[in-house]
Image: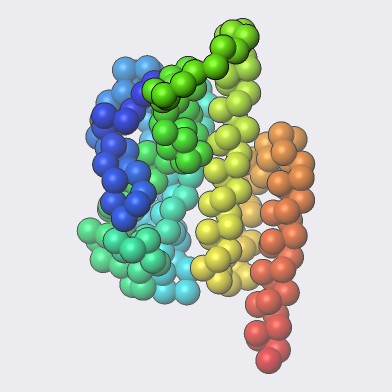
Amino acid sequence: MLGLNVNEHTEKKNGLTYLSWAWAWAEALKADPTANFMVHMFDNKPYMDVNGSAMVWVSVTMFHKTMTCFLPVMDFRNKCIQNPDGFEVNKAIMRCLTKALALHGLGLYIYAGEDLPEGEEKPVERVEAKPKAQPKTQGEKDAEADLAGLELFVQGIRDFIGFSPTEADLVSFWKNNQEKLDELKAGLPQRHAEVVEMFKQAKAAIKEKQNG
């Protein structure tokens, strides 16, 4: 799935690229017929309440590996929606599903800001001769996909903290993502340190607001 070109199944809105969730899920089932996904529930709601806005969580399991992604419920301007309705929550869940699939490699290059997957090149007017690079092994490709997935996870954390969660939200987030945070610490220790600092600053800001 990692090197699959998904460009024909995307559309652009407000300068951002979106992948068709239906097509993406169909491709996931082709790659692994046992694949499944789960929408996380919070107090019997399919989203986490963050000061009146909402954050949806989706986990996708493929090849016996589970990847979890989260996404705020946003409007067409990609601004957080206050008190979203069922339609808006459902749309966010489907978008979150495609991001969770990206953590497994499908269309990951879209979220990395690239135009084409690895192995494909844009046509250029002049091409200089370069030594032919050795093809990467599957292990190297898997390692790159894991690191890219961790970077996407960190970006999601930045988004989450940007919505000014409560201290209880921060604690819940950390507990629910302990395994992923451990992976981040092992794979990208500097990013893990940045995340720890983000949480410390967020907690300090909450306490300062309460005391003020």
Image quadrant assignment for residue 148: top right
Residue 41 in the image: above or below residue 9: below
Q: Position of residue 191 (x, y in %)?
A: 71, 46
Q: Residue at x 36, y 49 (%)?
A: 16
Which one is in front, 117 or 2? 117
Q: How many marks?
A: 0
Which quadrant, please, contains the N terminus?
top left
Residue 64 in the image: above or below residue 134: below
In the drawing, does residue 196 fall left or right of residue 155? right
Image quadrant assignment for residue 184: top right
Residue 84 in the image: above or below residue 56: below
Residue 195 at least partly seen: yes
Q: Residue at x 39, y 46 (%)?
A: 96
Residue 55 in the image: above or below residue 153: below
Q: Residue at x 69, y 54 (%)?
A: 195
Q: Position of residue 119 (x, y in %)?
A: 48, 17
Residue 38 at least partly seen: no
Which one is in front, 37 or 95? 95
Which quadrant, please, contains the C terminus?
bottom right
Q: Position of residue 121 (x, y in %)?
A: 44, 22
Q: Position of residue 74 (x, y in %)?
A: 36, 61
Q: Residue at x 70, y 80 (%)?
A: 207
